[in-house]
Amino acid sequence: MSGVDSLRARIEALREAPAPPADQVRAAVSELLVALEHGNARAAECVDGRWIAHGWVKSGILLGFRFGKNVPYATAGPLHFRDRDTFPTWDPGSTDRDVRIVPGGSSVRRGAYLGAGVVLMPPCFVNVGAWVGDGTMIDSHALVGSCAQIGRRVHLSAAAQVGGVLEPIGALPVIVEDDVFVGGGCGIYEGTRVGTRAVLAAGVVLTRSVPLYDLVRGEEIRADGGGPLVVPEGAVVVPGSRPASGEFAARRGIHLHAPVIVKYRDASTSAAAALEGALR
């Protein structure tokens, strides 16, 4: 049995135990955070083209919150922190990967993975269980929520919000695949997967409960059953609106938010060029 398999078995046993020993829980949680930070464990991963969630990772994180104790942390200038002692901030010195965390108030919780060449602009926040691929830029006031999976060479613009998912255990976290551009003020929330090379214009909001309208292919994209809302590969998405149903809404001209695909990137089109063309 590999080290990760052994850790999984221990966490699953501790989760099922009616009164697990605190020292064993804390030891397992600490080991899990190290595995997450080194990329040896992930909250979700793509296997044979299909994304699957690893519920045992979420279970371990939740055990950490359950058995952690609130303690004050050492101050950083005028900043003061008080949180679970099981989840201190991430130590950049724990890896030899070339990661930049620009001074100015950003915070990365332990148990997050930051790939080589990742740049974090202040202030931003990366939560426990998140995975951020090589060469990704996370801009100011952006959020990468718990267990969110962010691909390689992604750009999260200022104030972009990528939601976190810890419960239910088996729920797929928010996934942003490789080479995606996410515009300023976008919101990508529970039950959403953004396909490779997609472009989201500023202000786009995506959740699994809101349909996505594809003007190019004449389709309405919805989340199926318990699956996520999937933004197709290379789609260029802009904020739109659709008429609200009912006579009352019609009389008053009320419209609802509707994300809209207006074009698709080709192999040679940059994200900036695709977005500029779409907005024109």
Image (cartoon, rainbow, N blue to C red):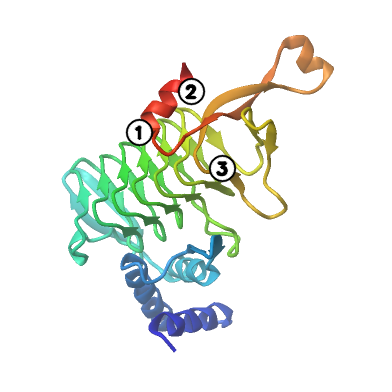
Which secondary structure, mark 3?
A: loop
- Residue 20 visible (yes or no): no
Give the residue pinned by disc 1: 158
Image quadrant where residue 253 sits: top right
In this orientation, which residue lies closer to the viewer: 38 or 270? 270
Q: Identify the residue at image location x=40%, y=78%.
A: 28
Give the residue pinned by disc 3: 232
Q: Is residue 121 left or right of residue 49?
A: left
Q: Is residue 46 left or right of residue 214?
A: left
- Going from the N terminus, do you reach mark 1 or mark 3 first? 1
| Location of residue 15 with respect to 6 vertically, above or below | above
Image quadrant where residue 156 sits: top left
Q: Identify the residue at image location x=40%, y=57%.
A: 130
Which secondary structure, mark 1?
A: loop
Amino acid type, callout 3: Pro
| Location of residue 151 with respect to 187 vertically, above or below | below
Q: Identify the residue at image location x=63%, y=44%.
A: 208
Amino acid type, callout 2: Ala
Cα distance in 3D space between marks 1 and 3: 23 Å
Give the residue pinned by disc 2: 278
- Going from the N terminus, do you reach mark 2 or mark 3 first? 3
Judged from this view, the residue extending furthest toward the right is 247
In this orientation, which residue lies closer to the viewer: 3 or 154? 154
- Residue 259 visible (yes or no): yes
Q: Identify the residue at image location x=56%, y=83%.
A: 17
Cα distance in 3D space between marks 2 and 3: 16 Å
Given this view, does label 1 or label 3 mark the residue nearer the observer? 3
- Going from the N terminus, do you reach mark 2 or mark 1 first? 1
